[in-house]
Amino acid sequence: MKLAIQTIVVFLVAAGLCWAGGYETKGKAGPYGVVATFDQVKPIEGTNKLRIVVTDSASRHVLDAKVNIEYLMPSLPGKPPMMDYHTPANPSGDGYGATLNLTMKGQWKAIISIARPNGTEKMTFDFVVK
């Protein structure tokens, strides 16, 4: 019995460490707090899962928004982005989930749009695909 409990504890700690290892960024989109977490320690070339949690000024989860992500690879000043993709983030648990297909290594920019009846707010963050 004691060994079974120890095994469960080790499993839960290991699972927590795996989840804690995802690349995370925090910011504000107007009055909203936003936490965006990739499923990888570092975003990779190819398929990446992104989890977005939106909270209001009272730290309550916002679950009635339409959340979209634009992700692009910036180019030289005055030129359009080399790659520019858009994807919705669908409700999932206490947040939103999306799949990003990062087609190339290098510097990327993500713009998270949060739309509610009172308007749309945005948060931008940069990340690198290695």
Image (cartoon, grey):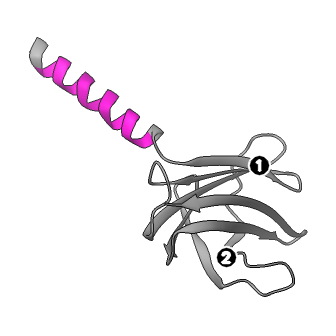
Decide whether residue 76 is among the magenta residues: no
In the image, what residue type sits under mark 1? Gly
Q: Residue at x 73, y 78 (%)?
A: 75
Crowd rating for badge 2 (residues with CA inside 10 Å; few <14, some 14–19, many 20+): many
Residue ID for mark 1: 27
Q: Measuring from the top left, give residue 61's x and y in whole percent.
A: 69, 49
Choose top left, top right, bottom left or bottom right for residue 119.
bottom right
Residue 111 picture quarter: bottom right
CB contact under 8 Å: marks 1 and 2 = no
For marks 1 and 2, give the one nearer the viewer: 2
On the image, numbered disc 2 is attached to which residue?
72
Q: Quadrant of residue 114?
A: bottom right
What count of labels does the image hold? 2
Does 34 appear above or below 99?
A: above
Q: What residue is at 42 percent from the left and 42 percent from the top?
A: 19
Q: Position of residue 46 (x, y in %)?
A: 42, 72
Q: Amino acid at mark 2?
A: Leu
Taking the view exactly as shown, the residue that stands out farthest to the top is 2
Q: Position of residue 56 (x, y in %)?
A: 80, 48
Query: Which percent across, then down, holds residue 93?
Result: 52, 55
Looking at the rendering, the stretch of residues picked out in magenta corresponds to 4-19
- Our reading of the magenta stretch's main secondary structure is helix
Going from N to C along the chain, the mark reached first, 1 or 2, is: 1
User: Is label 1 in a helix, a strand or a loop?
Assistant: strand
Label 1 and label 2: CA atoms lie apart by 19 Å
User: Is residue 5 covered in magenta?
Assistant: yes
